Amino acid sequence: MGYTDHFNFEREPFSNAPNDKFYFDSDQHNQALLRLKYSVDSDKGLAVLVGGVGTGKTTLARRMLDDLPYEKYESSLLVMIHSAITPEWIMSRISMQLGVKNPDQNPLKMLKQLYERLLEIEKEGRKAVVLIDEAQMLQTRELMEEFRGLLNLEIPDKKLLNIIFFGLPELDSIMKLDAPLAQRVAFKYTLKPFSAEAAMEYINHRLQVVNCEVTPFSDEALVLIYKFSEGVPRLINTICDNALFETYLRHETEVTAEIINNVVEDLGLSTLDPALAPVDELDDDELDGLEIVYDGLEEGS
């Protein structure tokens, strides 16, 4: 028996593993998708989304890929897992994912193959889109120049390829390795941590997805979750998941402030001795939005 059975959840509500069922359409995520989609539909060429660690960039990239139906788009998502990639690898991978069969090993011939494939996509009335996640791993001028070259694949009055970078804030500096590329950014959006209200809505949303009828989190626990996570979705998930497990191990039904303090201390997320941060000394502003948690949920006893 795990904590899912203990709390009568259908599944773990705060896993950090990607799962479309838990996608939370916050106002800023919605605004980001609208802008990025407009960039693609109007053939702007290059758009950029940046955000701190754990703010949901990968989730947003996957969501956007799902929102690009095949009948209208030829799209792909590439995740840069290390910084040792080469321009040749990038070109080959993009070519294959956009439908080029057997890309030539000669870079110029491969570029010609890609251009011909992009023309085919254009004649089909579709748009070619490449999403690059963890784009801050593209750490050389040669790679930036390669993407600038790809953006030059166009026909009169229209670009044949749209590229969207998703990355950490240092991506801004990396793109400046090739100033002409940095100047070609048509749209840029920055993801920020959740506000207190949005964080409460996020927790509420994930509980509703697993059909939670009675919230296990006390008001004081929720205040501390926001305080220690600073509104970062990944940290919210980690704290909530660990807190639920700790509550289950104690054979209790309510996640208390004490449990949150213990969890964040174990995780190394607390910069204060928990004894020095009593809940009754928190600012009133930190309680803003807490009632959102009970929209559709009953408060636990």
Image: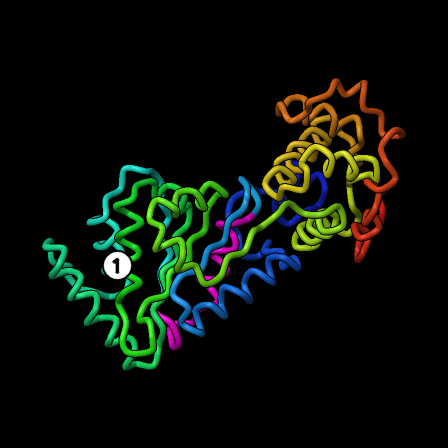
Quadrant (top left, top right, bottom left, bottom right) of the C terminus: top right
The residue where tag 1 is placed is 149
Q: How is the image coloured?
A: rainbow
SS for dot 1: helix
Q: Is residue 268 magenta?
A: no
Q: Is residue 64 magenta?
A: yes
What residue appears at the point 84 percent right and 40 percent down from the top-left corner? 219
What residue appears at the point 32 percent right and 67 percent down from the top-left corner? 161
Quarter occupied by residue 23 = bottom right
What residue appears at the point 36 percent right and 73 percent down from the top-left corner? 127
x and y percent of residue 65 in the render? 44, 62
Nearest the viewer among 190 and 116 is 190
Q: Which residues, given as a range, are shown in magenta?
A: 56-74
Disc 1 crowd, CA 10 A, few/some/many (<14, 14-19, 20+): few
x and y percent of residue 76 in the render? 35, 60
What residue appears at the point 49 percent right and 53 percent down from the top-left corner? 49
Q: Is residue 41 above or below residue 109?
A: below
Residue 171 appears anywhere in the view: yes
Q: Amino acid at mark 1?
A: Gly
Q: Is residue 248 above or below residue 207?
A: above
x and y percent of residue 283 in the render? 86, 35
Quarter occupied by residue 100 = bottom left
Quadrant (top left, top right, bottom left, bottom right) of the N terminus: top right
Left or right placement of residue 67 versus residue 290 in this view: left
